[in-house]
Every structure is written in structure tokens, then in C-alpha cells.
Image (tube, rainbow, N blue to C red):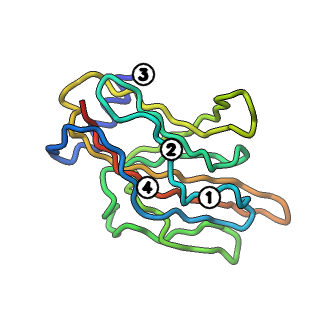
Amino acid sequence: MTRPFLLLLTAFLVAGPVAAQTPSVTPFGQGCRGPLLLPDRYDPGQGMWVPTQPSIGKTLYVSAPWAPDDYVALLLVGKSNTKWLNSSLPLTVPTNFAPAYQTGPCLLTSIELIASGILWYPYGKVQDQRWIVAFPIPKDTTLVGLRFYMQWAIYRANTVGGFQAEMAWSAGAKVVVGQ
């Protein structure tokens, strides 16, 4: 599983050499709250929780602790936070696909890879649930300096009172792989 991930990530995300040797995760931008149906305790402005550093030979864990468990959590990974396809970022996208939808500059990163979050209960309690994605980073020195960007997109199809799709978007994070 690690080898296909490494090939896919390298093929899409290598954007030239980067001099940084120190692993880092730097937040940027603001999230979009989305529809009013998202409870107040869930604040996408929190961005993401990254408890580990992106170092070769280690696993990078990325979590969206603010995302409700009845939504689907997708981690968007890209090579740019300024341009995607022919559009400048951030990109204005809908947060609610009902007839009267809200929009905002919510998309902060290009999308070269989408990873589905796994619902995890770290302490065995529902109130401590987290959406999480784990990226094993091979112990390969050619990956040092690899730079990419991440953002959570949280989605739920709601059929109460007619169909509408609801979305919330996290703040972004710039990741640099180090030793």
C-alpha cells in the first residue's frame, strides 16, 4: 500500500526542489462554516489537527476534530495554494447546493489527491471522535523537501425537507516533508 501511495503522491505533487530540511505544517486561510445545520461546536476555522511532523520514515496523521460523525470527511491534497486548473485560489464554491445556496472563497488548495477520512474514537467515547487520515512517509531521502497543501472538505446529503447537499471547508495547511 505504501508504494502505490508514494508513486501517486510523487507523480502529482513534486513541484521542484525545496531547500527546507525541517518538517513543518503551517496553517493558512480560513475555513467556510457552511450551512446553519452545522452545530456551533463544530468550527471549521480550526482547520486541522496534525499531531505528528511530516518526517521520512514516520506516519503523518491529519485529523478534522471539528467534523461531525454524520458527515463524510474528505482530505484534499494538492501541489498549490495559488492556482488550480485555470483558476486562482482561493476559489468561490457553494457550501449548500439547495436552490438558495451560500458561496464563499472556500477552496484553498489545488486537488491532485482526495483521501477519505476514517472515523476514529481515540478514547472509546463518541464525544472524542475524530476524522483522521494516515499517510505513511517512506524513509526515502529524496522525499525531503517535498511540499504540498491540504484542506478538509466535509459533506453531508440531507433529505429532511427536500434534498440538499451541505458542505463545510477547513482552513488549509502547507506541509513540508523533512528528516
Which image quadrant: the N terminus? top left
Q: Is residue 77 left or right of residue 98?
A: left
**Is residue 100 positioned above or below 34 on the image?**
below
Q: Earlier in the sequence, mark 1 or mark 3?
A: 3
* Residue type pointed to by label 1: Asp
Q: CA distance from mark 1 to mark 4?
A: 14 Å
Question: Could you tell me residue 20's position as x and y percent?
Answer: 18, 43
**Is residue 80 positioned above or below 8 on the image?**
below
Residue at the spot 52% in from the left edge and 62% down from the top edge: 31
Q: Mark 1 = which residue?
A: 43
Crowding at dot 3, Cα within 10 Å, few <14 / some 14-19 / many 20+, comes out as few
Give the SS element for disc 1.
Answer: loop
Front position among marks 3 and 4:
4
**Is residue 101 positioned above or below 144 on the image?**
below
Front position among marks 1 and 3:
1
Q: CA distance from mark 1 to mark 2?
A: 12 Å
Front position among marks 4 and 2:
2
Q: Mark 4 = which residue?
A: 172
* Residue type pointed to by label 4: Gly
